[in-house]
Amino acid sequence: MKNNNAILITGGAGYIGSHTVVELFKAGYYPIIVDDFRNSNKSVIEGLTELMGESPIFYVIDVCDKTALEKLFLHYSFKGIIHFAAYKAVGESVADPLMYYRNNILGLVNVCELALKYNVNNFVFSSSCTVYGEPKELKEVSENTPKSEPNSPYGNTKLIGEQLLLDVQKSNKAFKVINLRYFNPVGAHPSSLIGEFPIGKPNNLLPFVTQTAIGKQESLLVFGNDYPTNDGTCIRDYIHVCDLAMAHVKAMMFLENKTEECIEAVNIGTGTGTSILEVINLFEKVSGVKLNWKFADRRKGDVIEIYANAKKANDLLNWKANYSIEDAILHAWNWEKKLVEHV
Ligand code: NAD
Ligand code: WQD
């Protein structure tokens, strides 16, 4: 089909992908979702339909199945690709690294091979601040900060993914790439029509906070209280998922307009670090709910403190975060309450 604005969104039914589909659609793009719902909930389609005013176009395909994926490239002439589809649980990747290498690397190889074969030259990749590992001196990392070893096989798949794209770009100068290095995505759409659906016990902090407050979890364990930070707990850069979604729109626009070769890594964060205790205090303030939490041992492999220098995102993509962390926490809490109403 010849829609000149079609963008392939692998993993578009997932947490970040679904929010990005909405922002792309609002910006006039025509998102085509590929997802086999292995880590997402089919009800996301209802939320997307309500937000877009029409059903999103989606195909239930495993990106590791190249034959099935190729049919889409024959059907649509894509203007660009945003590749979200991947596994993302750090602990699971330590237990089963090959499952992570298979899905995250094979999926990327397939999508890249098809992109080259069908001349789809604008490519945005979901990378992660995990590629920086533990920052050595400055906790504010820029794209030029030397990378340490990622702390997991999952992190390695992101580092390898970036390297793979660099090599592909070197041999195909028409292929333009932006690796977006997300910091810690949190929150949900302000409408509460879409959000995150953690499957099983959440690994990430904010879903654990909201699930504890609603009574799905008994108590939040705060991993470590003796780190060399202001209050002894770890510090992260929490970025609202809608701001993050907008970064993909800006990245796609940038690539479309770029006439020279392009391979760029860009941090997507707020530029501010927040400790776990600060998150808990803000949650209690925003929600009016007292949280049941206690200190526990440090979690193995945790980075102590990291936050983004987001200047390049602003300079290159004309992007910056607009939502505050209070907004993100409020939207995450509203979403949690909505999930309870609907079960
Ligand atoms: P998610 O699990 O909610 O979304 C990923 C989507 O991809 C899911 O809907 C899943 O069903 C789909 N998927 C996975 N493998 C697939 C396959 N082989 N074929 C088809 N669909 C497949 O995760 P998310 O939080 O939205 O993350 C999206 C991307 O961003 C991932 O690449 C992740 O590694 C990266 N990332 C996430 C975070 C985070 O904290 N959420 C941070 C940095 C980077
Ligand atoms: C944040 C802080 C925990 C849960 C992970 C991945 C990273 C990236 C984002 C994809 C840490 C603490 C957490 C809990 C806690 N993902 N915590 N109790 O570790 O920064 O990053 O997600 O690329 O690769 O590693 O995020 O939300 O898991 O943890 O005390 O129940 O909250 O120890 O200090 P993290 P997180």
Image (cartoon, grey):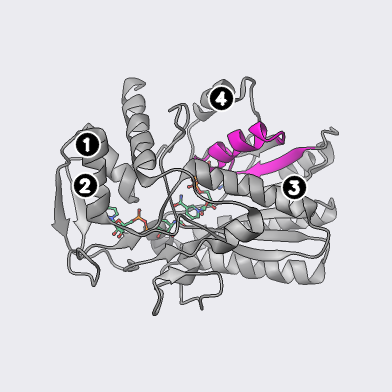
Q: Quadrant of residue 76?
A: top right
Decide if residue 63 is in sight here: no
Quarter occupied by residue 28: top right
Element under disc 2: helix
Q: Are marks 1 and 2 in contact (CB under 8 Å)?
A: no
Residues at marks 1 and 2, CA–CA distance in whole angstroms: 13 Å
Image coordinates of residue 144 in percent, x first then y, are 56, 74
Question: Pointer 3: residues within 10 angstroms few (<14), some, or many (20+)?
Answer: many
Q: Decide which of tag 4 and tag 3 comes sooner along the chain.
A: 4
Q: How far across and how far down the image is residue 16, in percent? A: 52, 43
* Mark 4 surroundings within 10 Å by alpha-carbon count, few (fewer than 14), some (14 through 19), many (20 or more): some
* Residue type indicated by callout 1: Ala
Q: Establish if 264 lies above or below 38.
A: below
Q: Of 89 and 48, which appears nearest the observer?
A: 48
* Left or right placement of residue 145 versus residue 249 in this view: left
Q: Residue at x 15, y 57 (%)?
A: 295
**Left-right relation of 203 to 214:** right
Q: Disc 4 versus disc 3: distance between alpha carbons? A: 22 Å
Q: Nearer the viewer, mark 1 or mark 2?
A: 2
Q: Nearer the viewer, mark 2 or mark 3?
A: 2
* Residue 182 in view, yes or no: yes
